[in-house]
Image (cartoon, helix red, strand yellow):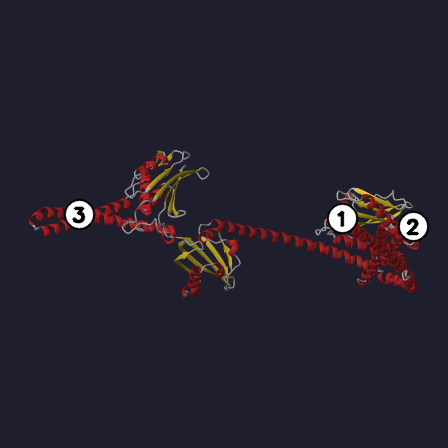
Amino acid sequence: MQKYQESATQDRKRQRREWIVILCLILVILPLYYVGIKYFDLGLDLPGSNSTLIFFLININIIILLGLLYLTVRNLVKLLFERKKSIMGARLRSKLVLAFILLSLMPTIILFFVSAQFISSSIEYWYNIPIERSLRNSIDLGQDYYEKSYQKIFDFGSNISRIITYDGLTPVTKNSDLVKFVNDKLNQYGFSRIRYYSQKMELRVSAQDRNQDLEYFTGPTQQELEESFNAATELRLKESSDYGELISGIIPIFSRTGNRAVVGLLVIDELLPAKFANKLKSVTNGLEEYQQSKMLKRPVKAIHMILLSIVTLLIIFISVWFGFYLSKGITVPIQELAEGTERIASGDYNFFIDLEAADEIGVLVNSFNRMTLDLKNSKKQIEEANEELIKSNMEIEQRRRYMEIVLTNVGAGVISADMEGRLLTVNKSAENMLGIQAGDVVGKNYREVMNPEQVRVINDFMADKGFRKQGYMQNQIRLVTADNKNLTLIVSLNMLRDEQGRYSGLVAVFDDFSEIEKAQREAAWRQVARRIAHEVKNPLTPIQLSAQRIKKRIGNKLDEDDAQMLNECTDMIVKEAEVLKRLVNEFSTYARMPAISPAPADLNKAVSEAVALYQVTQNNVTVSLKDSAFVPVFSFDNEQIKRVMINLLDNAITAAGPGGEVNVNLSYDKGLDLARIEVSDNGEGVPDEDKKRIFEPYFSTKSHGTGLGLAIVNQIIKDHRGFVDVVDNHPMGTRFIVELPVSV
């Protein structure tokens, strides 16, 4: 019972609010309607704010109209919804509301159309009177009068100007004649005033009608006179005051010479009566006001129609509201259900209606309580399932992130593709090895982003029968990357299959085998060098000694020709044996590279001592040194670094040729903590294809080179944990760059 009383109290409050809304609408509509009618009847006599007021009235009326329309439609839609949902009391409420609407709708509609037709006809009649044409004709007459006055001024003024020019009437020569001439023309043509200005814009002659008072008019300004004088053209002027309107014309006076130079200005004034000017201004203002009021024809008509629509909607709204008011007393218990529905919709499933009734309302309440309990249990189950799903998603996300971290940090390159060949995954190592960027290639077909050599290698893998049968293959390949680096890779290719065993893509894992292969090749060359040094060096000394003994024992017993031939042959044997011995010594040196013995030393001193050996050469090659005071003292093998410099300088001097230049520069990179040595020449340079192999053993670009000098340099710098590289020297030649870590 208490709930019924609370519902009744809420209904009374709601009804009171609706009555307040209706009264406020009535209080707003009536004054607005009165202001609209009054404003229109006064002839729109608000020149400064009429558009703003009309706009304000229209928008206020539209807001009120939309408010009434919203309230009416809201109640009707609510009623229709309740009837459609078969809510208790909805049928009775809809019948009462429909009856009141029908009783008020028919006369209201008839009154609306009759009033609308009357308003439309009245407004059309108000604006059909031919006032605008009459006002325009009056203005045209006034403008014609102005035009004729100006034409008179310029026609007679031009005539006066020509006479002054050809008769030579100037203030300098014939001032008295000019004054008399101007006064005669003033009386002859009936002008108000005629003035003559010299070239310096000075007023020399002025003639004025004594019956006209022109002291309230300032006349042309200095700027206007100069404008006409400089342009050598006529100029129209108009000046208004309370005593009339003065129209003036400035006419240039030309010289009698052929250049038509302006020698003076003639200013002719004619005073128009104040009555004429005021009447023309009044007609012009009247036309503007009429045009302005005509522009407001549609807004004024719209205001009346909107006000009429508001009254119609207000009547319909009152009918709907009264029907609801009568039906409220029957449907109070249903409000309890409505409140419960809203609370459940907002997520409160603990709501329970405590109501005992034996009629349909009791059945409805019991069903509602059971529904609430079922919703509460369902929500609990959904929340539990949602928590499990969130937990599973978090675990999956953690695994995914872990896999991404592994792929990012693993040393091997990893690339995956789908069954159509689109790249799905490219880790950091794969980017570095192949010279590509994951952001540029992921999502694209591998044929679009890889070079033809790489595509050929992949196609060979795919075409292999063993791979297609087993779904796995491992092989060693040589590959040219996007930045033209030759790599030796160990590639493992695996087919990806889903739970049903269907092919879904590929994953390739590859390791860079280039450095390992290079190390194996160097180890093999060292083994070869040791065997060559052992097998070849031993017989060289007996061969040299035998050749020398043959020359000594037999040379004196032969004739001159045979002795000469014997000497040449034995000398050749000794010389070539010496060359072989030097080659074997280099092999032995490379095969048995001693371990470095680093000790604190000055790099500037070590390099300068090596450069000093080459300051004067037989080929006249200039060797220059630029040391650096910033290179600190650090630990390195002094003798080995000298050996590096000797090998680099030998190559640079040979490459530079006679008259060439070799430059040695030392520097220190404080940020990287590196000491840098650069040896550059201005020779022919090294081809790009040879730069990749120039530090390999037994590779040489010289016809008599052993191919071990730069290999020894590379090994010594590696032992110092440094780096050596060869680049082009600009504008020509080659530059070797040696970088040594200072802190190691």
Q: Is residue 401 visible?
A: yes
Q: Is 141 situated above or below 650?
A: below
Q: Nearer the viewer, residue 485 or 364?
A: 485
- Circle 2 residues within 10 Å: few <14, some 14–19, many ≥20: few
Task: Residue 206: give x, y in percent of width and height.
Answer: 84, 44
**Mark 3 highlights which residue?**
574
Image spot of residue 567 (x, y percent): 13, 49
Residue 105 appears anywhere in the view: no
The amino acid pointed to by label 2 is Lys
Can you tell which quarter of the image residue 680 is in? Answer: top left
Among the two numbered marks 1 and 3 on one chain, the one whose residue lies closer to the N terminus? 1
- Distance from disc 1 to disc 2, alpha carbons, whole Å, reads 31 Å
Q: Residue under circle 2?
A: 275
**Mark 1 falls on what kind of element?**
helix
Residue depicted at x 24% and y 49%:
531
Report the amino acid beneath label 3. Answer: Val
Residue at 30%, 47% (x, y): give it.
708
| C-alpha gap between disc 3 and disc 2 | 138 Å
